[in-house]
Amino acid sequence: MKRLEKYILVEFLKLAGITFGAFIVLFLMVELFENIDRLTENKVPLAASAAFIMYKLPPIITQVSPIAVLLAVLLSLGILSRHGEITAMKAGGLRLMKVLLPLFVIGAVISASILFMNEAVTPGAFKKAESFEREWFGSGQSGSFGTSGVWIRSDDKIFNIRHIDLKSKELHGLTCYIIDKDFKVTERIEARLVAFDPSAPSAHSGWTAPAATVLNFPEGGEVRRTESTNLAIEGLGPPEELTSLENFRLTATFSELRQYIKALEADGTVPTSTGRISKAGWPSPW
């Protein structure tokens, strides 16, 4: 590496270290102050509290990297221009592209590193943070994310939700399996849409399906099928508790998202770039 390229690269890395450090410290302080009450109320040990804050570090790095790199580039070029170094380089016969080449190279390296972190590090750190919150704070509902949507276990019910729209407080493609002590399915509820009503009575979970299909499986009898309207769906928490489940999708790896999209398309659901889903045809009985 030539001396000029090394000089530009070193100056950029110095400023990038400062910008990255400033943003990371700022975000970590915000996370600490947002969770300090819960940590103290639940008497979380200092080491565990520090580990919980560190779990937030990989997502923070991926979030602040674009603005931090951009700010470092602007500052490094501004300092070079202020000291007349860019003018001196042009006077020496150097092309501007050659001057900027080290910045393009290091930018590509940082982008590749962030992509790798999003695939290999961030999902694991996020899952550890969610596990910590369930263990110490008791928040959220247990569930898993896979190619078939979100699975939730609640008492005597198992829910499968194809899509969670937290903005409109709606669940799309819900299937509820009601099981007995022997883990046999006694009833199945299928609903294309389930909406949340915050004004529902406290005894009601707040989730209601405008139209639903209920299948009963009595022992030694025929399966009974009924169509219900405004059916209350019990066993699900409010939308705020489902946020942790929806975040699995936000932090899923590229391969997981691709498999999930393929599964949606196989069921006749067409994912769109707006974040919503359109129904190109639902599987039976819809």
Image (cartoon, rainbow, N blue to C red):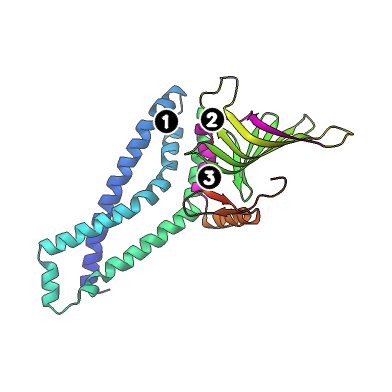
In this orientation, which residue lies closer to the viewer: 180 or 221? 221
Q: Is residue 225 on the magenta stretch?
A: yes
Residue at position x 23%, y 55% in the image = 15
* Cα distance between the residues tagged 1 and 3: 27 Å
The crowding category of the residue bearing disc 2, from other C-alpha atoms within 10 Å (few below 14, some 14 to 19, many at least 20), is some
Give the secondary structure at mark 2.
Answer: loop
Task: Check if mark 1's residue and mark 2's residue have beta carbons within 8 Å.
Answer: no
Q: Which residue is mark 1?
A: 46
User: Would residue 86 be found to the left or right of residue 63 on screen?
Assistant: left
Q: Which mark is residue 94?
A: none
Nearer to us: label 2 or label 3: 2
Q: Nearer the viewer, mark 1 or mark 3?
A: 3
Q: Are marks 1 and 3 in contact (CB under 8 Å)?
A: no
Q: CA separation, marks 1 and 2?
A: 31 Å
* Residue 34 in sight here: yes
In the visual, does 76 lie left or right of 258?
Answer: left
Does 225 appear above or below 275?
A: above
The amino acid pointed to by label 1 is Leu
The amino acid pointed to by label 2 is Pro
Q: Which mark is residue 238?
A: 2
Q: Could you say which is closer to the camera, residue 177 or residue 29? A: 177
| Residue 248 - label | 3
Residue range corresponding to the magenta coloring:
224-252
Q: Residues within 10 Å of mark 1 (few under 14, many from 20)?
A: few
Who's the residue at 45% across and 54% down the image?
117
Residue that appears at 37% across and 49% down: 63
Residue plotted at (30% across, 50% down): 20
Q: Amino acid at mark 3?
A: Phe
SS label for mark 1: helix
Precedes in sequence: disc 2 or disc 3: 2
